[in-house]
Image (spheres, grey):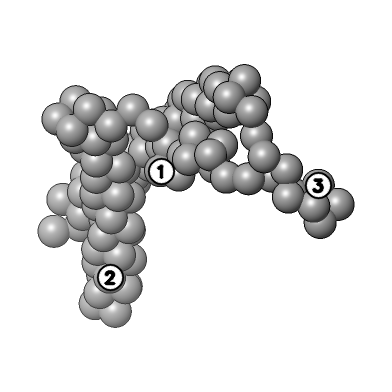
Amino acid sequence: MKTKLIQSIFLYLTAFVGVVMIAIGGTGLINLSIKTLVFDIREPEYSRVERCDDTRYVNGNEIERTEEDIAKCKKNAKIEDQRRWKMETAETISESVALLLIGSPIWFWAYRRGKKID
């Protein structure tokens, strides 16, 4: 009797952990899909392009930027923003898929095992 209760508690906790992992992984993929497909957000959360218009300080002295410097800075910042967005997207996808791939078998094992106990 006690053994069956302990097994049931263990299986329910294991199934709960699996469901939570599936929910977090699925939420991450859905969030990324909505950002890119619905709202067309294809930039990192924090952009560096706005920083190019600021004045530069070298050794405590204020230096005005030329138009050429600003254009070069914006071009480099845009390339860096695209690289960062790709990295953030790849990281989100890999984390979400990993949670789905690990959580699904855990939940499935607990579900099947729970059916055998009952």
In the figure, 89 relative to 45: above or below?
above
Q: Amino acid at mark 1?
A: Glu
Which residue was labeled with disc 2?
Answer: 9
Foreground: disc 1 or disc 2: 1
Crowd around label 2: few <14 · some 14–19 · many ≥20 (10 Å)? few
Read off the residue under disc 1. 45
Residue located 26% across and 60% down the image: 16
Answer with left or right where residue 63 lies relative to residue 29.
right
Disc 3 or 1, which lies upstream in sequence? Answer: 1
- Mark 3 neighbour class, 10 Å CA radius: few under 14, some 14 to 19, many 20 or more: few
Earlier in the chain: of badge 1 and badge 2, it is 2
| Residue to which mark 3 is pinned | 58
Instruction: Tell me residue 41's x, y (percent).
Output: 28, 32
Instruction: Give me the C-alpha separation between circle 3 and circle 2.
Output: 65 Å
Q: CA distance from mark 3 to mark 1?
A: 28 Å
Q: Quadrant of the C terminus?
A: bottom left
Q: Amino acid at mark 3?
A: Val
